Amino acid sequence: MDFSVSEEHQMLLDSADKIARDFPRDYYIECAKTKTFPKEQWAALAEAGFLGINTPVEYGGAGLGMLELVLLQERLAEHGVAPLFFVVNQGIAVPSISRHGTPEQKERWLPAIASGEKRCCFAITEPNAGTNTFKIQTVARDEGEHFVLNGNKLFISGIGDAHQVLVVARTSTGGDGARPGLTLLVVDTDADGLTWDPMDTMVSHAEHQYFVYFDEVKVPKANVLGKIDGGIDVLFDALNPERMVVAAGAIGGGRHVLQRGVDYANEREIFKGPIGAYQGLQHPMSEAKALLEAASLMIQKAAWLHDSGKHSKVVGDCANMGKMVGTDAAFKAADAALQCFGGYGFTESYDMLSHFITARLGKVAPINREMTLNYIGEYILGLPKSY
Ligand SMILES: Cc1cc2nc3c(=O)[nH]c(=O)nc-3n(C[C@H](O)[C@H](O)[C@H](O)COP(=O)(O)OP(=O)(O)OC[C@H]3O[C@@H](n4cnc5c(N)ncnc54)[C@H](O)[C@@H]3O)c2cc1C
């Protein structure tokens, strides 16, 4: 077992540092506030070859894997500038298309994602289904050569700046206790009948959330990813990478916010000496640091297992546990750091609350903490299903 950082990985991290210095958090937050896609940062990421980091070489990518994507996201997040598109585009769409796409589909979508010309977002969440994916009501009606999509999604990140959306839809009803058949379709965002409105989520990401409406949207059958009614197989392969990228972003973000707390606590003097000497502030930060580093190892292991082609159950175990401990650690870091700032933590100019909200979000989305505990209880510990 070798934990040293390879020369190749060091170059990746150095390059991520440079991009983050060129497009720092102030830039990213300004984009978030003005609801502007961070196109200069995206161009720099494309230029560095990072948008195709986990795309196979034959489709224009670097042919690296989840480990490199996780390292990259963790490092960008350490600077407070991790793109949410890395979760849905590189984290969900690329692994799904690479593993389940036909050669024609890979040729059609992957090179454009790797070059940065196109972006794909992901739409599963619905008002009446939420965590229970099998309750979704968006229906894809079979009309021979194509499907016709009808339904609503919400919280869809980045659709306003995406060229394709990977949609989860029902293609058969189930019934008699059987689950409905779900199918994944890649839909062009300029398709007739597809519209969206912004949501008022208060998270500091440059990628925004939207209500999305499908009204008689025609989708060619050539755009079905995987098998008709076999969307769950694609989802299983897609959601583990998603969890890894989310955890990496949380861990990096946790390091970033913790450093802010440490810097402030080393400077601020109220009684005798800097407030960082108080154990009431110091110990929670120390605890968060230890948890962040442990979570980082866990998520790198998940990514390594994924890249080594290990059985998906083992990958899922590490991805779920890593996502849970990573986002928990990030929340502890944000909470401990915020405490150091006293009242200033609640001012806009100190930009601390945005970290707190982002860290708290990790306990809810893209998968809530309780569902990761359900997974651990049921699939790792062998306890009865609770819901
Ligand atoms: C900023 C942001 C970005 C997002 N981006 C996307 C996106 O790009 N694409 C997309 O499709 N969705 C996206 N989502 C949606 C997100 O994935 C959902 O909000 C999340 O899956 C939870 O669904 P829900 O909000 O309907 O909560 P619900 O399903 O109503 O759950 C509410 C709460 O109940 C608890 N709970 C639910 N089920 C169980 C259970 N079985 N056992 C125990 N407790 C349970 C959990 O604590 C959960 O937080 C985003 C959300 C946010 C806030």
Image (cartoon, rainbow, N blue to C red):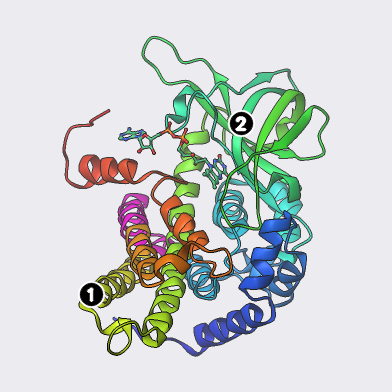
Residue 307 appears in the picture as rendered: no
Q: Secondary structure at mark 2?
A: strand
The x, y position of residue 199, in whole percent, is 64, 39
- Seen from the viewer's position, the closer of residues 64 and 365 is 365
Residue identified by numbered label 1? 283
Q: Quadrant of the N terminus?
A: bottom left
Q: Quadrant of the C terminus?
A: top left
Position of 321 with respect to 229 (left or right) is left
Q: Which of the two marks, 2 or 1, is nearer to us in this view?
A: 1
Residue identified by numbered label 2? 153
Mark 1 nearby-residue class (10 Å; few <14, some 14–19, many ≥20): some
Task: Please tell me which residue is depicted at 60% across the width and 55% down the height of the picture.
Answer: 94
Task: Please tell me which residue is depicted at 33% across the width and 41% down the height of the picture.
Answer: 371
Q: Secondary structure at mark 1?
A: helix
Q: Amino acid at mark 1?
A: His
Q: In terms of secondary structure, what is the magenta stretch mainly?
A: helix
**Badge number at residue 357:** none
The x, y position of residue 51, in whole percent, is 66, 66
Q: Amino acid at mark 2?
A: Lys
Mark 2 C-beta to ligand 1 under 8 Å? yes
Task: Please tell me which residue is depicted at 57% across the width and 31% down the height of the picture.
Answer: 183
Image position of 274 with respect to 80: above or below: below
Name the image quarter holding residue 113: bottom right
Image position of 241 with respect to 196: above or below: below
Total numbered labels placed on residues in the image: 2
Q: Is residue 339 magenta?
A: no
Q: Which residues are magenta?
A: 302-326
Task: Please tell me which residue is depicted at 35% across the width and 51% down the height of the picture.
Answer: 316
Q: Is residue 314 magenta?
A: yes
- Marks 2 and 1, how far apart at CA: 43 Å
The x, y position of residue 363, in whole percent, is 38, 49
Name the image quarter holding residue 189: top right
